[in-house]
Amino acid sequence: MSERAAALVIGASVGGFSAAAYLARAGLHTLLLEAEEAPREPGGALIALDPRMVAELRLPASGLSFAARDLPMAITGDMPLLLGRDLYAASAALAKFSDADALAWPTWRRRLTAEARRLRRWWWTAPDTGVPDAAWSAGARESFRHLCFSGADAYLHARFETPSLLAALLWDAGAGGFAVSEPGSALALVWRAAQEIVGLQDAAAVAYPGTLIGSLTHALGMAQLRTQTRVTRIFIKSGGVTGVALADGSEIEADHIVSTLSRADTLALAGLPHIAPSIAEAKILLRVTPDFAVPDSPPARHILAIRPDMHADAHEAARAGRIAADLPMEWVTMAPGLISVTARPVPASLDGQQRLKLAAKAVLALSPAMPGLSDALTHVEIRLKPQRARLADLLAPPPFRLLTPVKGLLLAGDDAEPLPAISGRAGRLAARLLLSS
Amino acid sequence: MRYDAAIIGAGADGLTAAATLAKAGLKVVVLERAPRAGGRLATLEFHPGHFASLYADAVPEVPAAIARALGLDLRPVHSLPDALRATRDAALARAFAEAMEAPAAGTLARWLAPPPEAWPGEDLAVAELAAWPAQRSRAFAGRALDPELAGSALALLSLPLDEAVSGGLGALGDDFAEGAQAAGAEIRLRREVVEVVIAEARAAGVALSDGSRVMAKSVISTLDLRRSLLSLFSRTALPAHMLEEARNWRMAGATARLLLALRRPLRRETPLFLPGDGAAGAAFRHGRMPEAPPLLLDPVSRRDLSLAPDGAATATITLGAIPHRLFDGGWTPEKRTALAAHALARIEKAIPGTLAILVSVKIIVPPDMESGLAATAGDLDGGVLAPDQMLSLRPGPRTALSGFYLGGRSTQAGPLGTGAAGFAAAAALMADGIR
């Protein structure tokens, strides 16, 4: 082999940058390998950008700035609603549709926040005890157990009655590919609440185009970024990694590899058995002419889901390889002239026809709120992200999500998080785990 | 006259509770709305000479102790993998142990005392039914589960395993009733309970629809959770959190049955399962009649010759994912016929020649189950078999009202065994002592 590095990081995503930056700071000769021509901006709202990473890598000092922070949830349609951090404003907005929901909202949000505070430790630090903690009260333990075994639809239906509110809240429960009746999907709501309390500004935020990747590149320091470098194989010898093979035929030796690809893709590269997910989340990036005015004031994440049932229907359709007739979506404005639509669940692989159909669906779904959108459209890009959320991932301490059966091979991608999220946290934790071993 | 216990409902649970208490020397009365005892253990002569069980062909296993005590004659129809059997036995043992343990003062209700740790079988609450292909069809029959979703494996714990040796489930129901009477319990038929009488903050008897009252020191209700708490009490009689829990308890019937009288035996000796298509689940949720619901054809007279006249045959079809309430109104005769026609067409395709030997069909849809069994929404499981409604998260036999016990399918032991919930309620009542 011609080249040797102390550590390799596969994929210049936020997690990859974060892992490479931390490894380089510890003095390791680190290479960050990216298959594309340049690192890509995350397409969509950022959830849970790790505040510690932002501070330690001094990202704001090297340019990171936000176009919008703390996006409230907006529900459009017959019952327009804006649900932000202010419990009383949200409650007052809900009172137009249902007194019971207006009453239930603040209580529920407080309970959810309390659960989130309790669970934060398992999601972000490495505890030495299992869930639940012995220090919890009997009531807390009971309520946690109930959450573990509850599907979000049953959990929410017992609390709220307005269909469009239920449909919008169920959108968050479907994160990572959960079916909303599956155990674990209720915990996805708690996970979301935990992002909101830790981030304060970053629970759902949009960075100015270029500033996130720009500041992360700056933070790389001594680590080297190599673009157009596709890894085709991870070499293993007696249970540990020894290096990688690249698409151009060359090889790089390394004892430590951090992969930001999904678990399935990483194990596939290493030639190990893996389960490929059957459903995915689609990001549809719509570029429009700069003079097209997007009605997004105040900035919000707009949920396009009116019927609570549509989540379960779409999940069934996606598993059967179809795109549901009624597909739940969320859209945010990324920049003037750039709209990001997230649609899930969709089948894990889409043919050309299905991609076309998906793009058309997104444009059609946005059109009532944005007359003239189809004329203003200049470019459409679809990115698919296969997903397989599991209850076990929401309950395991971080090392179990980062580790693989191979010694020296760690995961730090979006799905090394309890639920897929562009946070950089997994990269930071993977670097720490690697350095401590 | 004052009884020691009044039991609402003479199904397997009510009769088991009655027999258990009567054997211990208590004076027990069972009040049943219908003209015969047995509850869901009922067999109907739906065509001259043709008999079939109305609600199911087989029932979850009757725990051996109950079968012995009541002198039941049972035949196991299926076997369960050892691991599942062990899980089920452990869960049942846990339910019985908790019932028999007299609770500390102030913790009468499950609502006040959370269970300390995980129950046996809770790993099934995050597993998929699809991972048990051999059991899948039987657990799926008559239900609206999505077998590929985590949590659906819980249905394995309530698989039907036993049936009567002869005479259908109705004969088994008669055996249960005889066993209870032999033990000394009194069974009163055609007596509908409309309210539980409360005196001095505890259950003191029941009021009947004819205006009379039956006084008892304790009351066991074998109705489901919703009916027990929401229909037997005035609105202010119970604590608000109990009522809220009952209101949030989800019930959804999904079973329809077709009883077929056939001129000749079917050209098939074993049950036939046809899985539903992908749209059945969505149709169920939206209150539409699914075009191809999951279907289980059971040629019951192959195993039990007494169910059909000589040379003829009786078969049943159990359909799942059939909504209790259709979005476009009630279950009219036309819709029932359409349901039967769809199902028979699929059977004809799988076993050609079936239609030619068909003599008569009896159709049973979820509303029929609701009116026949007083089960909310026609739900035969006492509540949707979702992870959050199983095992430890189901109510136990005790309630926040002293002297009032739950012994129906909605309780912890309910789906795990036939008569088990009644036995647990009786055990709890005896453990608490009669004041």
Image: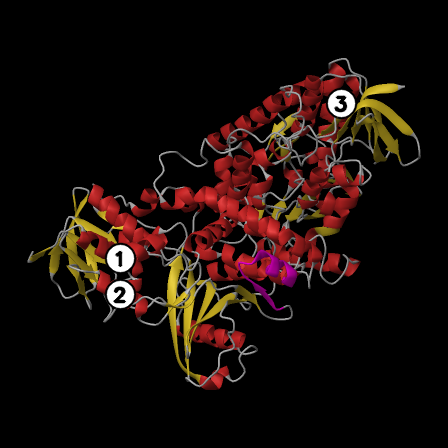
Q: Which residues are magenta?
A: A80-93
Above or below for A39 versus B264:
below
Dot 1 lies on which element? loop
Residue B159 on the magenta segment: no
Q: Which residue is mark 3?
A: B18
Dot 2 lies on which element? helix
Along the viewing direction, whichever of B157 and A267 lies nearer the viewer: A267
Q: Residue, x 66% and y 56% (percent of image)?
A: A102
Q: Residue, x 63% and y 63% (percent of image)?
A: A93
| Callout 2 amino acid | Ser
Q: Position of residue B409 (x, y in %)?
A: 67, 35
Between the C-alphas of marks 3 and 1, the distance is: 72 Å
Q: Could one spot residue A9 in this view of the protein?
A: yes
Q: Which residue is mark 1?
A: A57
| Callout 1 amino acid | Leu
Above or below for B70 versus B381:
above
Q: Position of residue A346 (x, y in %)?
A: 46, 64
